Amino acid sequence: MDRETPEADEVTAQAAVGLEISQWKYLSSEADDPQMHAILSVRVNGAEGGGRGPVLAQVLAVDCSSSMTWPPEKLHAAQQAAAAAIRMLSDGTPFAVVRGNEKAAVVYPGTPGMARADDRSRAAAERAVHRLVAGGGTCIGAWLDLSHRLLAEQDAPIGHVLLLTDGKNQHDERMPLAKVLENCAGRFVCDAWGIGDGWDGRELLRITRRLHGSASSVHEEAALPAEYEKLMERLLTKTVPELEITVTPMAGAAVRYLKQVYPTEAQLIPEGGTQRFVTRAWGDETRRYQLCLSADPAARPRHEDLQLAVVTVEAPGGTEVRLPPPQPCVVHWTDNPALSARTDAQVEHFEHHQRLGEAIATATDAHRRGERDLAERNLGWAVRLAHAMGADQQLGRLARLVEIDDARAGQVRLRSEVTAVDFERLITASSHSTYGPASGTGTGSATDAAGPGGGAAVPCPSCAHQAPATARFCPSCRHRFPGRP
């Protein structure tokens, strides 16, 4: 792999952003609490490669609590995975390795701050990783706080933390995670991995949804290094540090929320009391967001399209990208229930995903309480939802926990050998959503700088993940599609 940092800035100069809004515009003028839901598709093209200087600053946070000592393969897999990630860092990339237990300490470099990647520092960091010894408790807040302080000293546009843990956050009182997440939000991206059988899936999702990352796990410890390599490969293609989505409501309308729903679920918190939402670390990819607006039909004209809000995408900090024109979100007040009862296909798809996640969470809680029948019923509901969406990957994951007799009807039988960690893996996997249906129920085709933002989804021939029909590569496994523009 060529680790040299590209000198030219032609990639960032050519990067283009597209925006498309998919919605069903008809709302009942008689509704008690009218809400308009829409899916925003934001797409970046031409961002692969790099600009001037390192784009990424990387912290590897490795759980070294006492639970990592058994079985011995667990710590060994964590060391191998960290070493694999270090080997992929481009020359000049600032990086550090953090050892985490009830405290946090930098094990590489041995001097204050972060090292710059080169052959010597990568080899020295690998040696430090293989000298890691496990012992003590778990305080994830301390690990993230130290990572935050390290990254704050760097000028790389994208800060990233790759966190690995095998346990629950048992020493939260030392460094409360809620306060740390509040301080870290918007400062860096965090991807988190669970290993072993004692970690908490919802805790990992709490971290990654707040810090714009994703939560994952492996069934076999030996698979972790390869997964780290794939994650780093995707990460190193991200060269647009952030994009801002601004929603400007018209008089009588208000923004309820904007949340990321694809490829993973993530919380978006408006900045400084405005309706400006920051999204972090973009490569060539499409993300989808669900927008919810409240609206007041009082004294509004009926039977015509009215502008409800305007959505714009901007690139702060002087990032050189071509931006799309603002796009309207409209409303058409109607007293025809046949019109107002319909829902946009994309909105319905991602609401199905949300209900699938809720069913899995309820099943997990029931299994923890020993209520196998309730767990089975909720997993059956999850299977029914996954089948209705055509979400084959989710069905495959559910099939690890249940024998599926009739997917359409949700008739399943809980497997006798299912363990608690199987549910934790399913919780994290359920946060990875599918692309969804094509546009076509919205307000029309949007013009944008990057070409169509939506379009049909097609299965990747390599991993079967659903990918946009216009994509140049699979967003899951990075398989390139020949002949795509």
Image: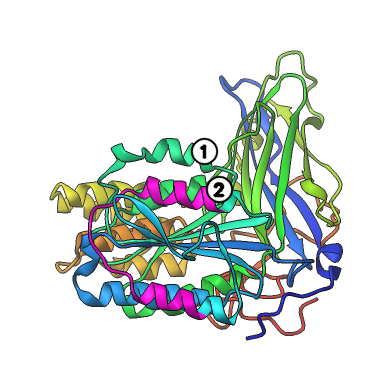
Q: Quadrant of the C terminus?
A: bottom right
Q: Is residue 224 visible?
A: no
Q: What percent of the width, then of the height, locates residue 3?
A: 66, 80
Q: Quadrant of residue 57?
A: bottom right
Q: Quadrant of residue 95?
A: bottom right
| Residue lying at the far top of the rendered structure | 299
Q: What percent of the width, then of the height, locates residue 186?
A: 59, 44
Mark 2, residue position: 348
Relative to residue 38, is residue 207 drawn left or right? left
Reply yes or no: does residue 143 show up in magenta. yes
Q: Quadrant of the N terminus?
A: bottom right
Relative to residue 282, is residue 220 drawn left or right? left
Q: Nearer the viewer, mark 1 or mark 2?
A: 1
Q: How many marks?
A: 2
Amino acid type at mark 2: Glu
What segment is highlighted magenta in the picture?
123-150
The numbered mark at residue 183 is: 1
Q: What percent of the width, then of the height, locates residue 83?
A: 45, 77
Amino acid type at mark 1: Asn
Q: What percent of the width, then of the height, locates residue 136?
A: 23, 56
Relative to residue 248, is residue 93 drawn left or right? left
Classify 121 as above or below 416. below
Reply yes or no: does residue 484 show up in magenta. no
Q: Main secondary structure of the magenta part?
A: helix
Q: Are marks 1 and 2 in contact (CB under 8 Å)?
A: no
Given residues 66 and 340, the one toward you in this image is 66
Q: Is residue 134 visible?
A: yes
| Residue occupying the point 39% across, 52% down | 204
Give the color scheme: rainbow, by chain, secondary structure or one colour.
rainbow
